[in-house]
Image: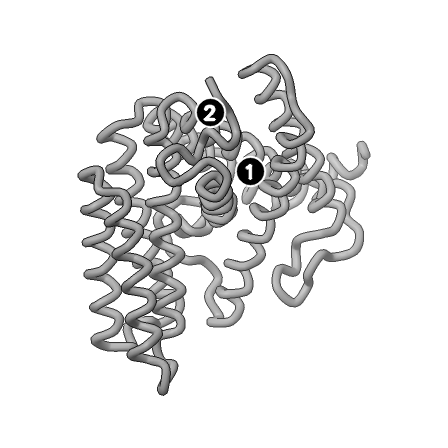
Amino acid sequence: MGLGLGRLASSASWTDLRSRLISALVLGIAVLLLTAIGGVAFRLLCCATSVIVFDEWARMTRAKRAGDIYLFAWRALFVGLAAFFFGFHAVAVGVVVLSLAFIAIVDRGERKADWVMGGLFYAALAGIAPGLLREDGAEGLAVLGLVICVVWATDVFAYFSGRIVGGPKLMPLVSPKKTISGAIGGLAAGVACGAVFSIWLVGSVSAITLVLCVLLSVLGQAGDLYESWVKRRFGVKDSGRLIPGHGGLMDRIDALIFATGAAWIFGMLVAGADHPARAFFRL
């Protein structure tokens, strides 16, 4: 273990880690503050996130080649985000769903807009899902806190576990640097941090919460691998250059998009669209 730490500190990877940590710290503080504030500030953050994600996705996948369908997707996203921002949540979700269905029907013969559809869905999930969870009062803030704890702990400890322990690669054709030891270490840390957060918040941790923490950690890692696959598919190293040391915004929040989206969908199925966060906590 000591030799592993020594190799990490003396290698060029420390420079990469330092840049990642600084960027993560600055971005993390801003996100946490706006999440805690909620209201208009958080809705603006969600809308900006959604727009940036769609732009990065479009550049990465060359979605502009779809022409008019690409422009239609942009307009649909803006309409959906406007509806979300002004509190018309059902309209926001409906606009995105109907737009995806329209694109699928129009493009069914040529299939030129598959990546446009993927980008619209991904971008809407990145902005609308956390926004709708946060709108559910104290429970919404608690759920987002749980998701952030699990995903960020998973990401950080997966990095350290993989660098220090090493071993067999997880999916070398998709992400050559990720290891099985990193995935396991990240999963353990994510579940542990989620459990600590639950105990701090409500005084206990249930079996359901532990299962959800496992799912959030796994889905977060799946989101990271999915973006790695997309980038490799199009021969792109980073989704953008927005964040120093870590490329684009998607490179930083890919795991959060999957995990938050899953939490929102699960919450809607269990507790209804009006109060999805109550599927996790009742404060």
Give how far across and how far down residue 148 sits, in percent. Answer: 50, 33
Amino acid residing under circle 1: Val
Please tell me how crowded label 2 is: few (under 14), some (14-19), or many (20+) other residues with Cα within 10 Å.
many
Give how far across and how far down residue 143 sits, in percent. Answer: 48, 30
Left or right: 266 in relation to 50: right
Query: Which residue is the site of mark 1?
Result: 151
Left or right: 201 in relation to 48: right
Residue 159's disc number:
none
Mark 1: secondary structure: helix
| Between discs 1 and 2, the one toward the N terminus | 2
On the question of residue 207 being in view, the answer is yes
Which residue is drawn at the image coordinates 41% and 58% (left, top)? 239
Which residue is drawn at the image coordinates 36% and 31% (left, top)? 134
- Looking at the picture, tell me which residue is in the foreground, 272 or 254: 272
Amino acid residing under circle 2: Ala
Question: Within the image, what quadrant is residue 184 found in?
Answer: top right
Q: Is 2 situated above or below 109?
A: above
Query: Which residue is the site of mark 2?
Result: 142
